[in-house]
Image (cartoon, grey):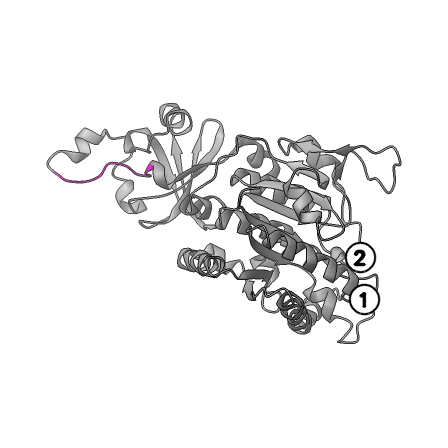
Amino acid sequence: MSKKRIVLKIGSSSLTNSKGEIDEQKFMDHIKAIAALRSFGHEIVLVSSGAVAAGFRALGYPGRPVTLKGKQAAAAVGQSLLIQNYMLKLGQYKITPAQILLTRADFSIKERYKNAYSTLEELLGRGIIPIINENDTVSVAELTFGDNDMLSALVSGLVHAEQLIILTDINGVYDSHPAKNKMAKRFDQIDEVTSPLLSIAEGSGTKIGTGGMLSKLLAARTANSLGVKVFIGSGHGENKLLNIMAGCGDGTYVGGENLSSLKNTKQWIAFHSAVTGRIFVDEGAEQALLNRGSSLLPAGIQKLSGSFEKGDVVEVHGKSGLLGKGEVLYPSYILERMIGKQSTELAYGTNMSMEIIHRDQWVTIPRERKIINE
């Protein structure tokens, strides 16, 4: 088995008992499996839920808090307990972990996104396991990743992982809820996460965690779009992660063989950047962007919407709707004077670059993702 970079996401239900406390038996099962995977030379990034679930008992809550202040207080207590346990147990195998708490701003601000990547690369290069969680203590609803499933998918793209493993309490994706339908059939392999598949996914099956199968499939679709294969399922024993990597895990594998990775710049544009305006293009420009891998030139632009500066990210719309996003090379007030003009006309007697959005700063939005996000 060749050395791979793996992002492992462990959900709250896979870490805690029915009372919301860290289950030591479950916890050690994960630790042994991580140690076994590391012994084969694989690099591991761990995205671990469980902070709120681990902390609410210590605050006197009878169950998982529902208020924002309750969740943030529980996370403040629980995150310390969680990382302390990881450090103690991984230390028994001479593995050093590093805690990283992220917010959406760490991804949406370009420089912080680059810094997060550099930090993770440095840690992995030194044989350390980064343990990542969302910084629930300071996050607000508008600035969250939604859940750790999506966080793990975005992290897997950021570090260019070969595999994302999402461990949960259900052994894969079924065509109906297995607890409600004894005849439910499991999908062993899903090449593509489609709208019909998402429509049959149901909500959370546990009161401890926040993400159900729908969130896992959405995360898998995102990871696949970033070139990362996904496993969703369960397992027991120290060889469970090795079995998953060998293709015989107890769950569902998501993603075909022809996945293409995205450079970090394009990942940031596609998933994290704030959109400050819109450019509307004609049919010729649409075909050039979608089918010929061309840059956007002023001749194909019909109109603008919004005010933006050089380096901002804008949406590009055509006859068929939203086409994609890209970083503009000109501010809107200059671009207004360039609309519809040929490059030769504009460039005569100047050394101006005529690309409005260079193809290296352009990302096409797949049709499937547009439909689901609308």
Whether residue 9 can be seen here: yes
Mark 1 and mark 2 in contact? Answer it, CB < 8 Å.
yes
CA neighbours of label 1 inside 10 A, class few (<14), some (14 to 19), many (20+)? some
**Residue 230 in the image: x percent, y percent?**
62, 41
Residue drawn at (64%, 47%) of the image: 165
Residue positioned most to the bottom: 59
In the image, residue 299 sits, relative to residue 1, either above or below, namely above
Magenta span: chief secondary structure: loop
Give the residue pinned by disc 2: 207
Give the residue pinned by disc 1: 63
The amino acid pointed to by label 1 is: Gly
The quadrant of the image that shows the C terminus is: top right
Magenta-tinted stretch: 350-358
Image side of residue 124 versus residue 135, left or right: left
Residue drawn at (69%, 43%) of the image: 243
CA neighbours of label 2 inside 10 A, class few (<14), some (14 to 19), many (20+)? some
Residue positioned most to the left: 349
